[in-house]
Amino acid sequence: MSANPMHSADIVESLGRAIGREHVLTEPAEREFHAMDVYNARELPLAVVRPGSIAELQAVVRLAAAAGVALVPRGGGASYTDGYLPATPNSLLVDTSRLNRIIEINTEDMYVTAEPGVTWHDLWQALKEKGVRASFWGPFSGIKATLGGSASQNSASLGSGNYGISADAILGFEIVLANGEILRTGSFAAANGKPFFRWYGPDLTGLFCGDAGALGIKASISLRLIKSPPYFGAASFGFETFEQMAAGMAAVARENVSADNFGLDPRLQQGQLGKANAKDAVAAALAVAKTARNPLEAAGKLVKMAAAGKRFLAGHNYSAHYTVEGVSRGEIKGKLAVLRAAMEPHGQETANTIPTVIRAMPFMPLYAVLGPKGERWVPMHGIMPFSKMNEFHAKLSRLYADNAARMQKLKVDKGGMFLAINTNAFLYEPVFYWEDDRTVFHNRFLPQEYLNLLPKYPANPDGRALVRELRGEIRKVFASVGAVHMQVGKTYPYMEGRQAEAARAIREIKKELDPAGIMNPGALQL
Ligand SMILES: Cc1cc2nc3c(=O)[nH]c(=O)nc-3n(C[C@H](O)[C@H](O)[C@H](O)COP(=O)(O)OP(=O)(O)OC[C@H]3O[C@@H](n4cnc5c(N)ncnc54)[C@H](O)[C@@H]3O)c2cc1C
């Protein structure tokens, strides 16, 4: 990136004139917090800027381009792959929290258009009132995670069983390019077009899905709507081994009947239970009751949950959890029957407490940014075909076994979470926990009352270094089975080993859209 020696005080002054000085944060504490994710920190930006409209966002981009300053977008700050961490101090962090308007909910044409700083939680609430929902409707982090963040790094979870990932719900974008101009995609770019359909010639929308902000800044996002399914059902299964769970999850995925699903390994199962405190349990019970269609059904659900209590996964090492959706009780019954038949050879059905609670409170507070005992936490992930699940698991288990003594000595632990996406992909999420001191991020991201409940640990630089080393090794294991990644950021090797023509094409596109390289340098290894 070619830096222009314009003085940072001048930039701050110009930005202040464009968007209001109070929306240009230069205090070291603000710059430090906003430029740090749950796992890492890189360079401190010159300032954090908070444009309040798309026109202000364009003004910020034009000023940065003129000054040769990099722009690094930040949504909810809930990712952990250095995506919004500046690679150079000559950067402005663009915080989208004031770009939080839902522009249009169109229940005739079945799309919604919103600014990038709208959270998945707020979108869900606003749509619920109108009886509709986005087809993919958010990551579990949706209380903070934004549409812009998920669109720029792809997200899976709510709705991924049959609707895929965030990109599968997206109809079109408005992107602010490095020259400050707006580029529209999909039917929105057609003469007199509305953002109701993604496909009109080559898929420009797809170009910006998962670009980590390296190609431009999303100014609006349009998503496909469906009517909120009026009925849902839930089922959970326990397994002895990973292989049984994986085979069961793949078998169910192929049937295309589940709405949401996820699997847990022994460590994550314990974590889920260990984390439950009395206040959350009451909130969860109330929320579960609210999802029932009448008081009798509510009472039934709560009695079943209470009976299952905390023993519902006893005796099972691994578990998989499902919800199904439908327009009638009959559809739910039919889908659950198909699901159970697919799972029958692999696992044993158990109480469906976890998916029932998650359906009731899909966007829980993000307590998980620390482990259940206050440990540091960071996940990784890779997406692979079903045929590679066991090979990956065996290689990962070997890596952990080879490092077991070091991990134990340095107080590093690991777990795993799993998700089937549509009928054709398996997401494997290894998670690390280690005893270490908290950062500014944790202290500001989590409520003080919650932090007060957790133990604290002294700094553990050796444990931290081991986690870093193991993450590097796991990236190689993912690559060895041809896995791909959603949250690429500045962590996963997008360009490394990429087929030559594909690599050349993406470099040329970057050069065309962002010739001076001011858009999130380093993201996607560009
Ligand atoms: C407890 C917890 C649970 C989670 N659960 C899930 C889950 O279920 N599924 C899942 O997929 N992920 C999950 N995540 C990961 C993460 O929260 C999501 O992937 C989410 O999409 C991040 O959104 P964000 O708004 O916080 O993005 P950020 O972290 O702020 O940014 C992510 C990337 O997008 C870029 N970006 C942000 N806004 C824009 C914009 N307007 N234009 C261009 N680029 C932009 C940033 O530069 C960065 O590269 C979880 C995280 C936590 C902490």
Image: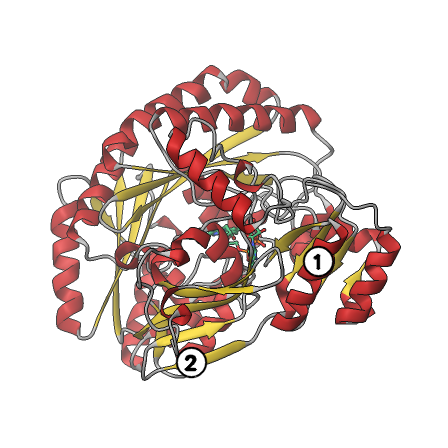
17 shown above or below 441: below
Q: Residue 506: give x, y in percent of width and height.
A: 46, 41
**Quarter where residue 289 is shown:** bottom left
Q: Residue 247: give x, y in percent of width and height.
A: 21, 37
Q: Which residue is mark 2?
A: 105
In what quadrant of the picture does the C terminus appear? top right
Q: Residue 57: give x, y in percent of width and height.
A: 65, 66
Q: Looking at the picture, tell me which residue is in the foreground, 183 or 254.
A: 183
Amino acid on which the number 1 mark rests in the picture: Gln
Is 89 positioned to the left or the right of 156 in the image? right
Structural crowding at the residue carrying mark 1, measured as other residues with C-alpha within 10 Å and reported as few (<14), some (14–19) or many (≥20): few
Q: How many marks?
A: 2
| Dot 2 beta carbon under 8 Å from ligand 1 | no
116 shown above or below 141: below
Helix, strand or loop for disc 2: strand
Helix, strand or loop for disc 1: helix
The residue that appears at 41% across and 75% down in the rendered structure is 112
Give the distance between the C-alpha atoms of the residues marked 2 and 1, in whole angstroms.
Answer: 36 Å
Residue 448, labelled with which disc? 1
**Quarter where residue 460 is shown:** top right
